[in-house]
Amino acid sequence: MLLFAFLPHAQAQDEASPLRITLAEAVEIALIHNYVLQQARMAEEDARLQIQLGVADIGYPTIEAFSSYTRNIREANPFAGSSAGDFFSGFAFVEWLGFNETARTDELDATQPITFGEFADRQRRGLDAAGIAPAQPSDNPFSVANQYLNSITLTQTILDAPRYTRLLHPDGFAAARQQIPKAVERQEQIIIGQVREAFYGALLAQEESRVAAQSVARTHTSRNETALRVSNGVLPKMERLTMDVELANRESELIQAQTRASNSIDQLKYLIGMAPRQELVLNGTLTIHQTSPYLAASASTAFEEASTQRPDLEEARLAHRYALNEVRATKMNALPKVNGFVNFNYTGRVPDNRSYTISDPNNPFAFTQGNNTYFSKAYWQSALNVGLSLEWTLFNGFERRRNVQRAEVAARQAGVNVDQLTANAKMEIETALRNLDTAYHQIGSQEVNVTNAELNYEYTLARSREGVANSLQVRAASSQLDTSRLNYLRAVHGYLVAQSNLEVALGIPIEKQTDLQLASANR
């Protein structure tokens, strides 16, 4: 139920009422609403999509469609300046020669060869008789008013050694896929540690504010008692003025402590992604209920555990493997690339005048006229072709060599990064173990110190009431009590933070983390 209160549409409704949360609930909320985690998850999604793009670029064919329409208003004669145009204008002579050859060989007296002029004149009369207007000559005998081009091309990579190395090698895309979620997993562990530390810090700040308030209350009581004794003539007026100054100082310290407590709450709100105006109340205390299981652990044993479960170490190792594979892939750029393709074209060449002349096969001077539709098969044609293409860069100005060298440098950098993260993990573990041990021993000594300080203050206060102890001694005993209590709380805070930092340094998975911090802060 708590998580629903942190949805954006519910925050405005609940900001008026205070919200009480435990440490476990703060962690749960942060895992959903923390800004850094949201960015990390989006980066993870983007990285996953990039890998999918790389796989799609190799494993799937590319299908492209193209379509165009051209309206030819006027086209130049492609045969201008050459004798090729005479070839096409001579088609009428071919018909005339064919007619005369038939007339000579048919052995009929009625058919005799005629001149070209007479042949052309009789054809014109035949066209006039059929009501057919002769076509106007064009500068371009191939020009068509309307041209359509539609094509679909399918291309499939058959051989691309660099890309297939990235796709199929275990240290290629497979390693990259394993690497992607590690960054988010590690960021979650870090955020949990930050939320814990902020929660403990807020609890400590509140305890410091409470101790400061108790100090003000005690000083106020002492000031009243001193004022009464001054009025009775037992003490000089200087004692009352001194207590007034002491009380003002304590009140100033209280204001500062309250400000630090408010700031620590605001920091916690920011970490868990909570609305700044929402009032937050912490449900927990700085108390240790059980000792850490890592107190007796050695740094070497702890690091062996961290080396197998820290996501950032595994991410760095995978990145190194991927970088080494990139060297292999880059070297293979020297090999040719082979693609297969299938191309289907559907073209249309549609004239504005779609009528055509039909000549009588028995009489070359008798004609009829026909008309085609816009989508007549005479104007629309299809074509299909398949083939292979080979690309082979034989020399590119040493670019390939430089790319290989850069890939090798990147691989060495990835190896150094593994070493650096390993050394950093060892340092974090050793520091956390030392801090945990130090805080544990401080807690024991401070518990005794708080008890002694409480007895000393009560004893001094009683002596003051009897007139044996002066106000200076009372203030000193009160200050010692405050300092002892704060030192104890700070030791507990340091212990809990060290325990949390150790779990982060070990890279303990979220589902396997101990309940030590949660239990100690929620009871």
Image: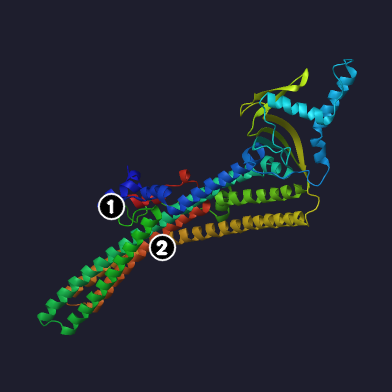
Closer-to-camera residue (416/224): 416
Instruction: Using a 10 Å C-alpha cutoff, classify the residue at mark 1 as few (fewer than 14 neighbours), some (14 to 19) or many (20 or more).
Output: some
Find the distance from the CA under tag 1 to the CA under tag 2.
40 Å
Locate residue 395, reporting x and y percent.
Answer: 80, 53
- The residue that disc 2 covers is 442
Of pointers 1 and 2, the one earlier in the residue sequence: 1
The residue lying furthest to the top in this view is 108
State left or right for residue 394 relative to residue 198.
right
State which quadrant residue 56 falls in. top right
State left or right for residue 158 relative to residue 269.
right
Closer-to-camera residue (145/34): 145
Question: Looking at the image, which residue is at 29% across and 50% down?
Answer: 12
Query: What secondary structure is found at the residue carrying circle 2?
Result: helix
> Are the residues tagged 1 and 2 within 8 Å (C-beta)?
no
Locate residue 143, reporting x and y percent.
Answer: 70, 38
- The residue that disc 1 covers is 15
Closer-to-camera residue (266/465): 266
Q: Amino acid at mark 2?
A: Gln
State left or right for residue 406 relative to residue 299.
right
